Image (tube, helix red, strand yellow):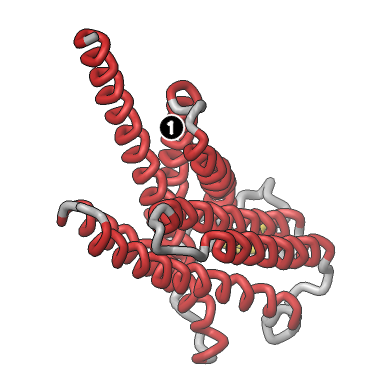
Amino acid sequence: MVGKCPEWMHYCYSGKAWSTATLSIGGSAMFVVVVTVLVLFILFLKNLHKLLHMRQHYKIFATTFVCAALRIPWWVMNMVTYKDNSPPAIAIQMLNRICMLALYLSQSFYVQTWLRVIIALRQYKGERALKIFFMLMDSVVSILLVIELIYRAFDTQGRNADGQYSALYTLGIDFIACSSLLTCVVYIVIGSTLFYKLKNYFTCTSKTILGFISVSVLLSIASLMRCITLFYRPVTGKHMDENAYAVLCYLLPDIIPCFTITMMQLIVYYGEQKKRVVLSRTNDDMEYIQ
């Protein structure tokens, strides 16, 4: 148990069973993501702002930044347990939901960059249907999570004598778990389609395909991990170890996609810069020939 209640912390109930290592890694990792995203955003804005197909990446930067930036105070506040329905307790839960929504949108926006490769092929005719599907999916998930967020802000019931929250609160948790499962399914479906296209229609090296598979697997595992953890107690009727819960529901499902997606944006940046260098050299050669 870490984080004993200071005397000045009036709303503190007790220390928390999350280890110092878990709290430290969570906060530090999100700080690294925030700094990296800011640096990449500046680089994209400075060098790639004229490229229309790069606009999607700004959405990824914004949502990833919101998730990582709000997770930092969230990890700090989770050093202790607060009294039910106290301002800090409500603030932690609201920060958690905003972070989960931002991460969900970040992953959705990132998957949509994969669609550019699929749609680029003449053989694929479902461009409009896919765009509508993602627009509806993102809108529905966002609206429902915002509704649940507003409900939590004004809910004064707290937990009952058995330590259980209200049915609507539990329903909100189940919805978050389902949205994680939906993200996993989307990764599998879209990822499998893109893998098929890369393998059969594009001249891609084995390294490129292996890298894509690795990213798909990592992101799918992270989403599935959170889903299973959130459904663990309702399905089994047992409470998971607190520290294991923190790692499997928050630490890894946040760190894996945030770092993976951010690193992929870095790869995109260097790839676009390389294209610019090659194009510049080609233009110089053409001018020399003329």
In the depicted structure, whether residue 92 falls above or below residue 38: below
| Residue 120 appears anywhere in the view | yes
Residue type pointed to by label 1: Leu
Going 72% across and 75% down the picture, which residue do you hit? Answer: 169
In the displayed structure image, the side of residue 64 where residue 118 appears, left or right: left
The image position of residue 272, as x and y in percent, is 34, 33
Going 57% across and 55% down the picture, which residue do you hit? Answer: 105
Tell me the residue that label 1 is attached to.
Answer: 40
Q: Residues within 10 Å of mark 1 (few under 14, many from 20)?
A: some
The image position of residue 19, as x and y in percent, is 42, 60
In the displayed structure image, the side of residue 217 where residue 48 appears, left or right: right
The answer to which of 221 and 242 lies nearer the viewer is 221
| Residue 79 appears anywhere in the view | no
| Residue 197 found in image quarter | bottom left
The image position of residue 216, as x and y in percent, is 34, 63
Q: Which residue ends up furthest to the bottom in the rendered image?
A: 236
Task: For the C terminus, give its image quadrant.
Answer: top left
